[in-house]
Image (tube, rainbow, N blue to C red):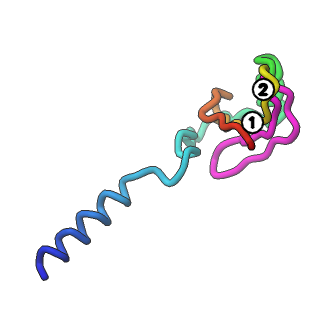
């Protein structure tokens, strides 16, 4: 019984330390935050065609067409505008 309890506690500790999702890369800096328009301008300067953009889980998330023509979802850090995630939409 002690082994089961120890394993359960260990597993819980491991799961609690994992990031909830990819947007955990966006840090709440407490400083200046870029606007959606600034994020869109930055993405377009990189060759993306933005279809929509919204704030979700601390990141700006955009649906876009990448420079290669693929439909993608992109996560942007709100403080720097850096791309923290890009995944292809199927």
Can you see residue 83?
A: yes
Q: Residue at x 82, y 25 (%)?
A: 69
Query: Under tag 1, what secondary structure?
Result: strand
The circle drawn on residue 72 is 1
Q: Position of residue 60 (x, y in %)?
A: 71, 41
From the viewer's side, name the closer residue of 53 and 7: 7
Tell whether 2 sits left or right of 82. left
The circle drawn on residue 66 is 2
| Chief secondary structure of the magenta portion | strand
Q: Quadrant of the N terminus?
A: bottom left
Query: Tags 2 and 1 in contact by the CB under 8 Å rule?
Result: yes
For the residue carrying disc 2, how many other residues have a C-alpha within 10 Å: few (<14), some (14-19), or many (20+)?
many
Mark 2 and mark 1: Cα distance apart in space: 7 Å
Q: Residue furthest left?
A: 2
86 relative to 3, above or below? above
Q: Residue at x 46, y 50 (%)?
A: 19
């Amino acid at each position: 019984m002690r082994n089961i309890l120890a394993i359960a506690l260990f597993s819980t500790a491991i799961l609690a330390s994992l990031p909830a999702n990819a947007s955990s890369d966006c840090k709440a800096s407490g400083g200046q935050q870029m606007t959606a328009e600034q994020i869109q301008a930055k993405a377009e300067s990189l060759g993306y065609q933005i279809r929509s953009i919204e704030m979700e889980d601390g990141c700006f998330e955009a649906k876009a067409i990448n420079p290669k023509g693929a439909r993608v979802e992109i996560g942007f850090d709100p403080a720097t505008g850096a791309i923290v995630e890009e995944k292809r939409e199927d």
